[in-house]
């Protein structure tokens, strides 16, 4: 069965951890007839949490894809993890979906990850809705949760469904849009019933608010609504579709996933009003870096983006793709534009969690899987025509937690490397690189949990014993005043001697300017052909600074004079002279150490604000700003990287696990005193140890 672009919807279910997303996904598939039985987290057999690590930990770790069909419309659902450690999987699902549904716990209200995800959705203006879960809980409250959403996000959610009863007496929900009631039926899907008489007024008032929201979508409708005070059911739908596609309204749904409650009206709303892929766009970038918005258009030649790569024990490599234009067909030829290689698409699938279902074709807007591709990697563009443009690689947050690793047994090095490459391909927020400066292999990710899961796999699945350490910091050195030096390299060895004299002046540059070389030689004191040798020597001299052997940055070097010998001079002599002159000059120029400073954004419950602030000041942090809304505070600060190496652990203990943060590199800043002394001492030990090896 194939579905045209207009009959496809893609929904990413996201939100704070443990809000019931996986359970909601399971019930959507069950109610939609895609699976015969709805499993629970406790049984460990849900469709979306199928990996061994998810079953063991009872949390989602990877994005999972499933789909249902109703009235000729195919709805793809992405179930995403709630833990910030796996945020890469949420962000890729946001891109693959035209509508994000954020699950919010009806008792706890909007929690920190949901705030962060909302911000992420704001960067693309992606349409979104909220599903208030667990309304069967006695302390849950639908209206209070909507008020919380209003306060935190400054939006007026439009209730599409209302709960009937609450807590232990939750009976079901009312679909305000279609004016129907649905009651809980235990393990079976909900049953449609008449709206109870005592709720008619509440429904009428919710319907009026819905009309107002729908009118937001269209000026004509707004006029009509103001004039008549009401809209027809058709007009409401038209208005909602438009308003939602433009992210002007936030539909809200009530329910209890575990009790199969609120599921049918959600599906019906998605079919009627969630954005049709045709109304959405993706971004291409050409060879010159110019960005173009591309519509999901089935009538254009085929193009598709690889959104994710996974490895399956039975099927091998799975390339998850989102078709953007045209139609992707099984048994076809295409080009992997990113690799500039031909790619044969043999078999094509959709899936329900890990279960693959073969299909013949996928139209623009649909998502699916290509197996055993020869060249495809995440972020690659597959197309029939090479236009020189490819889809924009996904923008992911920078890693926040790093660990240095090495295999205990040297013989395991290659196997460890292979495993890490694959892990980095499966989750683009996980990275690993060899830092030549500190001579360490460093793995980085979005948190301790993500890193620990990888370390567990190395140990238990790959059977490799590894050692881990806190990674070393890449310090820099620079100078703080002008100075100069001269150096003559002279050597007499039997035949040809070596001779070169250089006179240089050095001066500090602004932070981040790196290095500048100026040739100010007049009258041929050093012949032109030796100048490259001089510059090579300076660059070599800058690799190891005079303080602690860290690279030197932000220095202007001017060569002002020198001397040569008609027979004995050569490039090597000038190189050695320049290197030594630079070292001399640097010592006279008041050198200083520089440390990397990070931009840190912390999201916490307001009650932890004082503790977080005093911890940051103990970490030499500089607070740049602070915002608060609805009990959640956001603190922005600049903090030295060396103080943040264990921040995911520190913040967890300060906030009882509720806090979350982002970091990225800001700039290098000077350090002095005891802190600098410690760095120099540690580096000296490091070098001695190196020499011993
Ligand atoms: N009382 C109640 N519990 C629920 C409901 N829905 C889910 N749960 C329970 O809440 C827990 C978390 O459910 P999940 O579906 O795994 O939540 P999640 O949002 O997918 O969690 P992560 O993927 O880890 O973010 C499980 O124990 C569920 O059984 C509900 O409607 N009511
Ligand atoms: Mg889950």
Image (tube, rainbow, N blue to C red):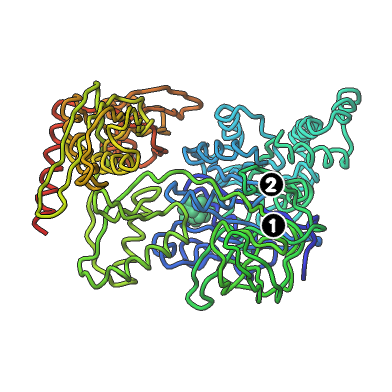
Decide which of 678, 149 is in the foreground and name it: 678
Percent position of residue 113, x then y: 48, 41
Horizontal relation, residue 621 to residue 275: left or right: left
Task: State yes or no: Cβ of the residue under disc 1 lies below 8 Å from any atom of ligand 1.
Answer: no
Q: Is residue 223 visible?
A: yes
Nearest to N terminus: mark 1 or mark 2: 2
Residue, x 49% and y 53% (percent of image)? 81
- Residue 579: percent from the left, percent from the top? 21, 40
**Residue visible at 53% across and 65% down in the picture:** 46
Left or right: 582 in relation to 312: left
Quadrant of the snapshot with the N terminus: bottom right
For the C terminus, the image quarter is bottom left
Contact, mark 1 vs mark 2 (Cβ under 8 Å): yes
Mark linked to residue 143: none
Q: Is residue 646 at least partly visible in the picture?
A: no
The residue lying at 62 percent from left, 70 percent from top is: 370
Using the image as rendered, state which of residue 562 and residue 640 is in the foreground: 562
Residue 173, numbered label: 2
Check the image and name the residue furthest to the bottom: 314
Q: Is residue 417 left or right of residue 171?
A: left
Residue 190 image label: 1
**Crowdedness near tag 1: few (<14), some (14–19) or many (≥20) residues, C-alpha within 10 Å:** many
Q: Give percent across and percent down for residue 601.
A: 41, 32
């Amino acid at each position: 069965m194939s579905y045209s672009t207009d009959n496809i919807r893609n929904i990413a279910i996201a939100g704070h951890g443990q809000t019931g997303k996986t359970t909601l996904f399971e019930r959507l598939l069950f109610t939609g007839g895609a699976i015969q039985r709805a499993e629970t987290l406790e049984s460990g057999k849900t469709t979306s949490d199928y990996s061994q690590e998810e079953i063991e930990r009872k949390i989602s770790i990877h994005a999972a894809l499933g789909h249902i069909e109703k009235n000729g419309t195919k709805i793809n659902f992405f179930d995403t993890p709630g833990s910030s450690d796996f945020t890469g999987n949420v962000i890729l699902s946001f891109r693959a979906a035209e509508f994000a549904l954020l699950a919010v716990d009806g008792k706890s209200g909007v929690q920190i990850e949901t705030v962060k995800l909302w911000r992420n959705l704001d960067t693309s203006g992606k349409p979104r809705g909220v599903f208030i879960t667990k309304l069967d809980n006695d302390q849950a409250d639908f209206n209070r949760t909507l008020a919380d959403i209003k306060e935190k996000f400054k939006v007026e959610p439009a209730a599409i469904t209302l709960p009937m009863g609450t807590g232990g007496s939750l009976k079901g929900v009312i679909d305000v849009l279609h004016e129907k009631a649905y009651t809980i039926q235990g393990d079976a899907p909900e049953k449609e019933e008449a709206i109870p008489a005592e709720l008619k007024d509440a429904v009428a008032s919710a319907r009026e608010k819905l009309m107002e929201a729908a009118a937001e979508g269209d000026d004509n409708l707004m006029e009509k609504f103001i004039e008549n005070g009401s809209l027809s059911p058709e007009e409401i739908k038209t208005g909602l579709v438009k308003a939602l596609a433009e992210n002007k309204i936030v539909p809200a749904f009530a329910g209890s996933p575990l009790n199969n409650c609120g599921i049918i009206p959600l599906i019906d709303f998605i079919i009627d009003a969630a954005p049709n892929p045709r109304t959405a766009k993706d971004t291409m970038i050409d060879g010159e870096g110019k960005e173009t918005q591309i519509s999901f258009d089935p009538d254009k030649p085929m193009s598709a983006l690889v959104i994710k790569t996974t490895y399956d024990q039975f099927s091998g490599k799975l390339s998850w793709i989102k078709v953007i234009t045209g139609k992707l067909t099984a048994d076809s030829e295409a080009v992997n534009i990113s690799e500039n290689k031909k790619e044969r698409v043999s078999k094509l699938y959709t899936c329900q969690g890990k279960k693959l279902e073969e299909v013949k074709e996928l139209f623009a807007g649909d998502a699916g899987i290509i197996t055993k591709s020869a060249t495809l990697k995440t972020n690659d563009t597959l197309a029939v025509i090479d236009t020189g443009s490819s889809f924009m690689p996904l923008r992911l947050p920078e890693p926040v937690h790093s660990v240095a690793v090495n295999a205990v047994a040297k013989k395991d090095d290659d196997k460890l490397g292979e495993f890490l490459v694959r892990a980095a391909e499966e989750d683009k927020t996980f990275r690993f690189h060899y830092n030549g400066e500190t001579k360490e292999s460093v793995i980085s990710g979005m948190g301790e949990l993500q890193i620990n899961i990888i370390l567990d796999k190395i140990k238990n699945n790959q059977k490799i014993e590894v050692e881990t350490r806190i990674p070393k910091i890449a310090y820099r050195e620079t100078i703080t005043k002008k100075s100069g030096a001269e150096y003559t390299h002279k050597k007499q060895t039997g035949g040809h001697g070596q001779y070169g004299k250089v006179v240089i002046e050095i001066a500090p540059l602004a932070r981040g300017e790196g290095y500048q070389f100026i040739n100010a030689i007049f009258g041929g004191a050093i012949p032109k052909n030796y100048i490259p040798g001089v510059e090579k020597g300076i660059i070599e001299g800058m690799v190891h600074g005079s303080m602690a052997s860290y690279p030197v940055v932000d220095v202007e070097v001017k060569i002002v004079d020198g001397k040569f010998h008609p027979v004995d001079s050569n490039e090597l002599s000038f190189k050695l002279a320049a290197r030594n002159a630079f070292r001399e000059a640097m010592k006279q120029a008041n050198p200083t150490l520089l440390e990397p400073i990070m931009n840190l954004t912390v999201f916490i419950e307001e009650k932890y604000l004082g503790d977080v602030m005093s911890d940051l000041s103990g970490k030499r942090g500089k607070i740049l700003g602070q915002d608060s809304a609805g009990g959640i505070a956001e603190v922005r600060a600049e903090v030295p990287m060396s103080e943040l190496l264990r921040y995911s652990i520190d913040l967890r203990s300060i906030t009882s696990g509720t806090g979350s943060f982002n970091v990225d590199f800001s700039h290098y800043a000077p350090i002095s005193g005891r802190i600098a002394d410690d760095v120099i001492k540690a580096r000296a030990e490091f070098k001695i140890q190196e020499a011993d090896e």
